[in-house]
Amino acid sequence: MSTSTIEAETGSYPVTDRNRVKRLHERGSYDRTAVHAILDAGMLCHVAYVIDGQPFCTPTIHWREGDMLYWHGSSASRMLRHLKTGTPACLTVSHLDGLVLARSGFNHSANYRSAMCFGTARLVEDPTEKEKALRAVIDRFYPDRSTLLRPTTGQEIKATAVIGMRIEDASAKVRAKGVGDDEEDYGLPIWAGVIPVRTVLGETEVSPHLPAGVSKPETLSLYGAGTRLDDALTEAQRLYEEAGNQ
Amino acid sequence: MSTSTIEAETGSYPVTDRNRVKRLHERGSYDRTAVHAILDAGMLCHVAYVIDGQPFCTPTIHWREGDMLYWHGSSASRMLRHLKTGTPACLTVSHLDGLVLARSGFNHSANYRSAMCFGTARLVEDPTEKEKALRAVIDRFYPDRSTLLRPTTGQEIKATAVIGMRIEDASAKVRAKGVGDDEEDYGLPIWAGVIPVRTVLGETEVSPHLPAGVSKPETLSLYGAGTRLDDALTEAQRLYEEAGNQ
């Protein structure tokens, strides 16, 4: 039995040179559930990859099925020729949760949740896997929406590149607490506190071209005005898995 | 006069192989003002760099002085030994502004603003530049706050690595509009619309260790509950530059 199989059974990603949390390691975790929770609470990710020694940090939308991460791009994308054979990549999702103002510059900080995932990014070329992925990018965010839509054309499928990456190792890092001042600074007459940050949804702007009588699907109530985006996305992923998509 | 000087005078970054916007290029721009506006509206960035062929995508806090980008880390950081001599990096700031639900899967999208900046990341070793940067990381976000704080110790300065990168080329990419359905899909009985996303500040949580009579500095009213984080950060940068720090 390989080390990675053992790790999978214990619910943690293997710890390697590239995912070991070196800085403030008490904030780190290799637990699958912790990593997945951070990934699933976000829609926006950043992917690092290398072309001819030059690193690129590309923002995109990601989705997850088990230990597989997916994102997509145009078939005209810069990265595509490197994906045919597979290329090392690092996909990171981060949430800024608060500004931490301390009594010293050194103890200023931020509350955050971040997950860094390492693996080999590959173009999804199998037609069945690609079709499933193009449904997933809709239904993972908007429950059952793909069944309501105008079907995707062959040309549209051709124009879209889907990239998949199995998470080989990963780490989660979280700071979720108050001001971390040195005790000897408590008595100083300096204001300190945490300003929370949250990402929320606004009032839906309905398309002006909608035919009369077409109403918003009930399933989109997940994304009601004032709802936290991370909560909505976490719940959408739960529904997606519950529907047997995992 | 070099090309880059000419470009600086016209207010645009040079267009090179690495920053040319290839996908949906109508959303792209190389304009300094456009790039800086996206950078300045964010606190969280992602930096891509390469160690032994392996890309890393690291979330961190960045700040900007003219065409210089700065971020910091622990002196124990993985990246440090590569920074002594300078290493190619790509720093990206992205804002998710809306979920775009169309009548076809292909036309689903997101509203966003993102800036990708390329350059060579170097450790800031000059004591004067490092001291200035450690003041800037406070004052750029919280006007004049560094003057109110317990002074930074030599040990703290030693434990903090400051990284600087001159932006050599960059691109901004923005989608800020309604649903982009094909006209022939307008008549379909499918709901379509945009769900706006915004990142806002919550009610300040004051440190429980504060001595009596210490009140919140007036300058922090920038970060009042309900304020959009991007607006607050943009205004803080404006005040920082107005105070002669640019």
Image (cartoon, coloured by chain):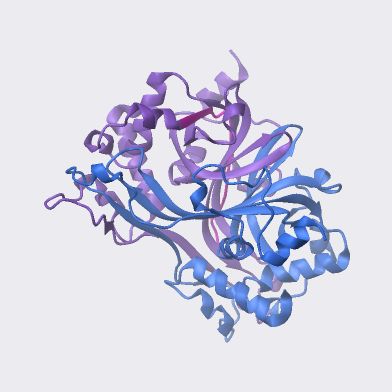
Chain colours: A purple, B blue
x, y (%) of residue B186? 23, 47
The residue that appears at 61% across and 36% down in the rendered structure is A90
Magenta-colored stretch includes residue A75 = no
The residue that appears at 73% across and 54% down in the rendered structure is B168
Magenta-colored stretch includes residue A166 = yes
Looking at this view, name the residue that lies furthest to the front: B1
Q: Is residue A179 above or below residue B113?
A: below
Looking at this view, name the residue that lies furthest to the left: A213
Q: Is residue A21 above or below residue B162?
A: above
Residue range highlighted in magenta:
A161-178
Of A231 and A58, which appears nearest the observer?
A: A58
Residue A226 visible in the snapshot: yes
x, y (%) of residue B199? 45, 62
x, y (%) of residue A216? 20, 50
Of A82 and A122, which appears nearest the observer?
A: A82
Of A38 and B136, which appears nearest the observer?
A: B136
In which quadrant is the N terminus of chain A drawn?
A: top right
x, y (%) of residue B70? 72, 60
Q: Is residue B64 above or below residue A49?
A: below
The residue that appears at 30% across and 44% down in the rendered structure is B182
Side of A138 where B201 appears, left or right? right
Residue B208 visible in the snapshot: no
* Quarter where residue A117 is shown: top right
In which quadrant is the C terminus of chain A drawn?
A: top left
